[in-house]
Amino acid sequence: MEKFDLVIHGGCIVDGSGKPPFEGDLALSGDQILKVSQKGTLQGKRRIDARGKIVAPGFVDIHSHSDYFLLVNPIAEAHLVQGVTTEIGGNCGYSAAPIWGEAAEQRRKDYQDLVEEDVSQWRTLKSYFDTLERRQIGINYGHLIGHNTLRHSISGVVERRLEDDEKREICLAVREALAEGAFGLSTGLIYSPGCFADTAELAAIGREAALAGAPFAFHMRSEGNQLVEAVEETLEIGRKTGGRVQISHLKTSGPKNWPKIDEVFERIEKGLREGQKVGVDRYPYIASQTVLSVVLPQWTYTGGREAMKARLKDPGQRKKIFEELASLHPLDGDYWSRIKLMAFKNLQNKVFEGVTLTEGARTTGKNPIEFMLDLLIDEETDIPSIFFTMSEENLRRILSKPYVSVASDSGCRARRGPLSEGSLHPRAFGTFPRVIKKYVLEEKILTLEEAIYKMTLQPCEQMNIPRRGVLREGYFADIVVFDLDRIEDCATFEDPKQYPSGIDFVLVNGQIAVENGELTGVRNGKVLKR
C-alpha cells in the first residue's frame, strides 16, 4: 500500500465546490493533495486525526491589504490562525508596486518607520515579488495593480483628465505588470488621485486587464448617496471592456441609503443575466475601516497631503471645508459619533485611540469638525478610522447572494509589535470564523458548504487562481481543519486582538503552519503569479 507524507484521517470533508460534505481521508505528498478517499484507509508517514471535525480548503481572502504588512510580519499570523492560506493584495487602487516618482517618495515617508526595506524601490512588480520571496512569507500572496498608485506615479495628485501620453503610459504599466504576474487591476474611486479619473480613463486601462483575461476590482465612486450610479458606472466599464469587474466590499453606507440595496441587486443581476462577468465581495461586519480624510470634500485632495494640510490651516479654505461638512453632516446629528479613531503617530494624540470624534471633541471643548480638522493637521492627514454606517439586515442579504464571496478588507495584523498598535478592526482577526459561527450556525442564512465555497473556490474563480480553493487530487495542499462546535470569532470592536477558537490545523502548501490552534513558525507560502 502506498504511504504518503501526511494523511488527514476521518474528517467531514467540505471540499469547497459547494457539494455536500462526505467523510474521508486526504493524502498529501510535498505541496499537493495526491488522493481523496471516502474509504478512510490511507496510510501516511504522519497522520492528523480529524474525526468529528471539518476539513476544508484553506480560506482565500480575495480582498486584503497586506502589501507592506507581510514585510513586517511575514508569517501573517492574524490571517493564518483564522484559516487563511491565500490572499490577494493591491486592492482599492493602492498597491506596493509598481511605483515610482512622487508616489514612491510619499510611500517611502509613510512606511520608513515600519518597513526595513526602501518601499520606493519597486519600479516593477518583479522587484516587489523578489523582496517578498526573500522574506519567506507564511501564506500564498497574489497582487493586483493599483490604478491610484500608477496615476500618482505618472501625474501626481492632480484634478484633471490624463493627457493622451499619460494614458498610454499608464496602460503600458498595466500591461507590463500583468505580464510579470499580477492577477488583475484595482481602483479606489473615493481616494485621490483615482477619484479624478473619468469613466473613459477607467475603461482604457480596464481593456488592458480584459485583454489579458484579468479582473478589474472597484472600490466604487460611492457606497452611499451615489451608490446606484456607482454600481452602474462599474457595470458600464465592464460592458465597454468585455472583462470581469469585481465590486469590492459591497455596502450601503448611511441609513438613508440602506433602501437602495434592492436596486443594487437588480442592476448586478441584470448584468449577470445579460452575460456580464461580475463578482462581488464583502466582509461580515457593519463597520468599515479607512482613512479619516475621506470625510473631506474631494477638492481638498488636489496636490497631495501637504497641499491638503495647507488648506486645513488656511482660514478661508478651512471655513469653506467646515461649512460643506456641517451642511452634509450637521453637528447635532449622530454622524460624528459613528466614527471611531483607530491609531495615531503622535504621542499626544494616542489618548484618542478607540474613541469617537464626538467623544474626543467633548474632552477638548471643540465641536467634532474642528476637532477632526486639527487632528488631521497634527497627523499629516493620515488617521485610520472605523465608520459605523451600515445595516445588519443588508449585510445578511448581501452575504446570501450566490455571486458574493467573503473577504476581510484587512492587512495581516499581529497581537504584538508594530502591527498590533492602535484600536484595530476585529475583521483582521475574525472574518472567516465569524461567517461560520454567526451566519451558518446561528443565523442559518448559509449552509456550511455554501459558506466554504464563498471563502475558497469562489474567490479563486473570481481571481483566476489555479489549483487552489478546492480539495481535489493534483491541487495544492492548502487545508484548514476546524471544530464546528468550537469555532468562534473572539475579536470584538472593544477587544479586537483576539485569536479565534476552533481552528485546529492550517496547512499551507502541505506544511503545518497552525497545529492545535498554535502557530508552528512554518513559513511555506508562495508568491502567486498569474
Image (cartoon, rainbow, N blue to C red):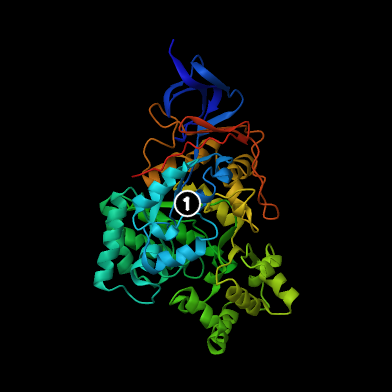
Secondary structure of the residue carrying tag 1 is: loop
- 517 vs 316: above or below: above
Q: Quick one: 112 or 501, which is closer to the camera?
A: 112
Above/below status of 290 relative to 520: below
Observer able to see residue 464: yes
Q: Is residue 511 left or right of residue 166?
A: right
Residue position for label 1: 63
Instruction: Tell me residue 327's x, y (percent).
Output: 58, 81
Q: Name the amino acid type tagged 1.
A: His
Q: Position of residue 198 (x, y in %)?
A: 35, 71
- Give 322 or 123, whichever is nearer the viewer: 123
Quarter of the image that includes the C terminus: top left
Residue 474 lies left or right of residue 259; in this view the side is left
* Residue in front for this viewpoint, 289 or 226: 289
Give how far across and how far down residue 141 sits, in percent.
Answer: 44, 45
Characterize the local packing of mark 1: few (<14), some (14-19) or many (20 or more) Cα atoms within 10 angstroms: many
The residue depicted at 49 percent of the width and 56 percent of the height is 249
Q: At which x and y percent is residue 382?
A: 55, 68
Which residue sits at x=58%, y=83%? 322
The residue sitting at the top extreme is 1
